[in-house]
Amino acid sequence: MLIRNGLHCSMSAKGNCYDNACAESFFHSLKIEAVHGERFRTREQMRRQVFEYIELDYNWQRRHSAIGMISPEAFEARMIA
């Protein structure tokens, strides 16, 4: 069906453990660091917690290999200076 419609499969062969490695790593961190053991009274509380984790912790404090193993915050500070 993909070939017939001129499309390319975006994932490799069955059993390739690297297909979802980035997503699995992120969701593991999210569960352990932000939501594991928490009791949310509303979906809005949960959404806010996840948003804050992604925007304030995960994206700004984690070191990234693509920018020399420094945090995005440190990278931007270097660019501004």
Image (spheres, rainbow, N blue to C red):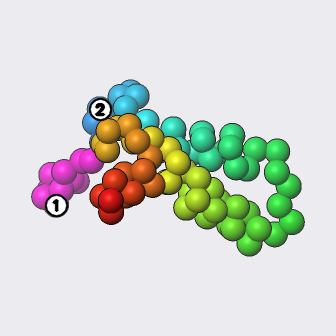
Label 2 neighbour load within 10 Å: few <14, some 14-19, many 20+: few
Query: Is residue 71 left or right of 49 when viewed as pictured?
Result: left
Main SS type for the magenta part?
A: loop
Q: Residue at x 16, y 60 (%)?
A: 5
Label 1 neighbour load within 10 Å: few <14, some 14-19, many 20+: few
Q: Position of residue 24 (x, y in %)?
A: 51, 39
Residue sitting farthest toward the bottom: 44
Q: Residue at x 32, y 39 (%)?
A: 68
Residue type, numbered disc 1: Asn
Q: Pick whichever of labels 1 and 2 is earlier in the sequence.
A: 1
Q: Residue at x 82, y 51 (%)?
A: 38
Query: Which residue does the numbered mark 1 point to in the structure image?
Result: 5
Residue type, numbered disc 2: Ala
Q: Is residue 4 magenta?
A: yes
Query: Which residue does the numbered mark 2 point to in the structure image?
Result: 13
Q: Position of residue 63 (x, y in %)?
A: 45, 41
SS at badge 2: loop
